[in-house]
Image: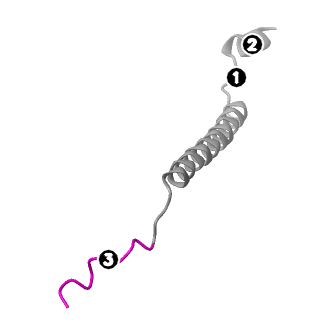
Amino acid sequence: MQGIYNCIPETNYFPREYSVAAILLLLFMVLISLVSVLNLLHFYISTFRNMCAVPNMAVFGSSLTS
């Protein structure tokens, strides 16, 4: 009974090529997601800046004096 477990084959063998492909795919998906999030953040910040821009005081001053 002691030696019965010595010859059990590995049942969940996963080839190394699949692991490398899975890691590369995961990195690619993270990169695409990061680029999308950064583009959305850039759009949000640029829109927010345009909406909340402080008027130029030189233009303001010249329109008040004339």
For residue 10, what is the image quadrant?
bottom left
Within-10-Å neighbours for mark 1: few <14, some 14–19, many 20+ = few
Within-10-Å neighbours for mark 3: few <14, some 14–19, many 20+ = few
At x 82%, y 8%, the residue is 66
At x 63%, y 44%, the residue is 37
Q: Secondary structure at mark 3?
A: loop
Q: CA distance from mark 2 to mark 1?
A: 8 Å
In this view of the protein, which residue sits in the foreground, 46 or 23? Answer: 23
In this view of the protein, which residue sits in the foreground, 38 or 51? Answer: 38
Q: Are marks 2 and 1 in contact (CB under 8 Å)?
A: yes
Q: Is residue 13 above or below residue 29?
A: below
Q: Is residue 7 above or below residue 19?
A: below
For residue 41, what is the image quadrant?
top right
Of labels 1 and 3, earlier in sequence is: 3
In the picture of the structure, the residue carrying the numbered disc 3 is 7
Label ID, residue 59: 2
Of labels 3 and 2, earlier in sequence is: 3
Please provide percent x and percent y for residue 47.
Answer: 72, 36
Label ID, residue 39: none
At x 72%, y 31%, the residue is 50
Q: Main secondary structure of the magenta part?
A: loop
Please provide percent x and percent y for residue 52.
Answer: 67, 34
Judged by depth in the image, the label closer to the viewer, 3 or 2, is 3
User: Disc 3 residue type?
Assistant: Cys
In this view of the protein, which residue sits in the foreground, 46 or 22? Answer: 22
Q: CA distance from mark 1 to mark 3?
A: 80 Å
Q: Which residues are magenta?
A: 1-11
6 drawn magenta:
yes
Within-10-Å neighbours for mark 2: few <14, some 14–19, many 20+ = few
In the picture of the structure, the residue carrying the numbered disc 1 is 55
